[in-house]
Amino acid sequence: MTARMGTARLGPAERATALRRMAAQELDVVVIGGGVVGAGVALDAATRGLTVGLLETRDFASGTSSRSSKLIHGGLRYLEQLNFDLVREALQERALLLQRIAPHLVRPVPFLFPLTHLGWERPYVGAGLTLYDTLGFSLGFTRGVPGHRHLSRRRALRLAPALRRTAFSGAVQYWDAQVDDARYVMTMLRTAATYGAEVASRAQVVGFLREGERVTGVRALDLEDGAELDVRARQVVNATGVWTDDIQELVGGRGQIHVRASKGVHLVVPRDRIHSLTGIILRTEKSVLFVIPWGRHWIIGTTDTRWDLDRAHPAASRSDIDYVLEHVNRVLSVPLSRDDVEGVYAGLRPLLSGESEETSKLSREHVVAHPVPGLVMVAGGKYTTYRVMARDAVDAVAHGLDQRVPPSCTDRIPLAGAEGYQALWNSRQRLAGSSGLHVARIEHLLQRYGSLIDEVITLIERDPSLALPLTGADDYLRAEIVHAATHEGARHLNDALSRRTHISIETFHRGLAVAEEAAELMAGPLGWDAEQTKREIEHYTKRIEAERLSQEQDTDQEADAIRLGAPEIVPVVGPAS
Ligand SMILES: Cc1cc2nc3c(=O)[nH]c(=O)nc-3n(C[C@H](O)[C@H](O)[C@H](O)COP(=O)(O)OP(=O)(O)OC[C@H]3O[C@@H](n4cnc5c(N)ncnc54)[C@H](O)[C@@H]3O)c2cc1C
């Protein structure tokens, strides 16, 4: 069906092989952390011809990289702060991701900016967006999204009838891009593995190997079976986001880079609760609030508050949810209530520590450092600029290796599923005919798998019962759960329901109604017996119950204490979080 050959899988057998190979040789580089930055580093290093291993303590993208606003954007806010270089760099990345690297996963998205002040605001916003559009042109690329346009209140209301007429006087519409953040990371790891990287989730770095002062590798714990392994590497990269300081402490000392966490909470509501053909961006006292179209849903957020509690499971409190509802309701003619909220998720921004106490003003730029010989740290930045961060980190790795290393080429490396995507999209009617699936289903699959759609269709050809949607989450096919386990590194029910699909935030039951069916589908490929299958369902149920209860609490402390009541499916030891 496609010209694509042999994209690496991340199934259980491949994980076992990766861990074995990592323990058996000295690698050029081992990466700690399987978020977007670590995955980017693995791909950058592998495509420069280096031998690479990557260790992630939980599931891929289970940290910040599955909990973002899912925007690939320059950031209008940084424009207002006159940080033109950051905006230009991010918009160049946006053009590259949209048009070359991942057109199947990154898509244009329109936003309406309602104007509330007569007079100065329209020229001010218009000038900003003209600059934004201009900075969006990058060398050799068009912008990849349409330019902005001014709208009267009447025309804006035609696009977004949900807006309260008296809440604004007119509007400007502009375009940015959006991504499925968790799937992007997993797809990048499959791409890296295809280029030879060894990657493993549920493998926690618990210490460093040293020769005197020099770091010569890491000690890791396989959290699935408790086995320890030493991974020798000539360079180690710490890409652990909000855990950066913990890793620095493992190596001794506080280091040069300090990262602190700022919590951002998003709500998910059904699409029919807000009648609009476009996303919306609203100013808040501290920052902005987005209303972002997301399939049959809206994602609304975010907040920005300091967080010093559990970093593995940041909890959203009642106050966070009320804050988001209160702000969005200021412009809606029919206000949203807590009953409209299908899903809630919280994430932690890895902010480079600065002098300012206000988290929304801390730097979004990244830093790369070489704190001790053999160790490179990369931190800060944002999702959109992960590729630049990865390139800079691997440049530092190259500096530490006494060999010539070619320059980064990831600007020319399409992710798995990108090649052939456009042709398949154009042929989606034919694909629907040959597969027996509805064309709307094919579109949904193409936007999740790109040209790797044939992997899902092959599963269905072998077992036609997999063509059925999940009962209770009919956006997703049964085949997608099996595929998550066989090809995409999902090792537990939560991985499939929260990150390979987003059932846990896209349904009012938050995945509980499909937990049994999904666990049974995963049991075969992952070799679970009845006991383990039951344990997976119980664990998932406890997690959802704890999250729901934590969202009833007024304060972060109360919400955190309750969320911590649901343990990890596998024992996770240190770093303390
Ligand atoms: C609310 C919110 C909204 C955002 N919205 C946007 C947006 O719209 N656009 C944008 O560009 N950016 C956005 N960002 C920023 C962006 O999401 C982050 O900058 C980015 O995801 C950070 O990726 P990372 O790889 O550094 O960290 P992470 O994704 O957290 O990855 C670090 C990984 O290291 C692992 N790890 C930790 N300790 C160990 C260990 N000992 N051994 C092995 N592994 C370990 C963790 O489990 C984790 O998976 C947002 C952030 C937040 C919080």
Image (spheres, rainbow, N blue to C red):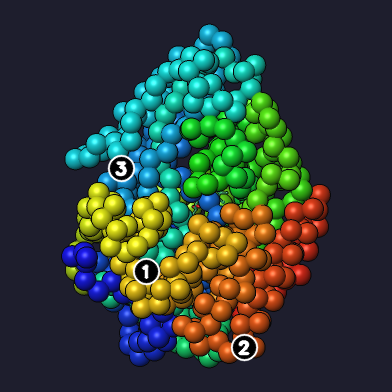
Residue 113: x, y in percent?
A: 51, 26
In the picture, measured across the screen, residue 75 lies left or right of residue 41, that is right
Q: Label 1 amino acid?
A: Val
Q: Residue furthest top?
A: 119
SS at badge 3: helix
Q: How many marks?
A: 3
For label 3, the residue is: 95
Residue 561: x, y in percent?
A: 78, 63
Query: Does 81 appear above or below 366?
Result: above
For the residues labelled 1 and 3, say whether their Cβ atoms are less than 8 Å apart.
no
The part of the image, by quadrant, that contains residue 400 is bottom left
Residue under the point 25% across and 66% down: 47
Looking at the rendered image, the disc whose residue lies closer to the viewer, 1 or 3, is 1
Residue 394: x, y in percent?
A: 32, 63
Q: Is residue 369 visible?
A: no
Q: Nearer the viewer, residue 348 or 495?
A: 495
SS at badge 1: helix
The circle drawn on residue 456 is: 1
Gap between marks 1 and 3 measured at Cα = 29 Å
For label 2, the residue is: 530
Earlier-in-chain disc, 2 versus 3? 3
The part of the image, by quadrant, that contains residue 6 is bottom left
Q: Label 2 amino acid?
A: Ala
SS at badge 2: helix
Earlier-in-chain disc, 2 versus 1? 1
Query: Does 357 appear above or below 34?
Result: above
Residue under the point 62% across and 88% down: 530
Q: Indicate yes or no: mark 3 CB to ligand 1 under 8 Å.
A: no
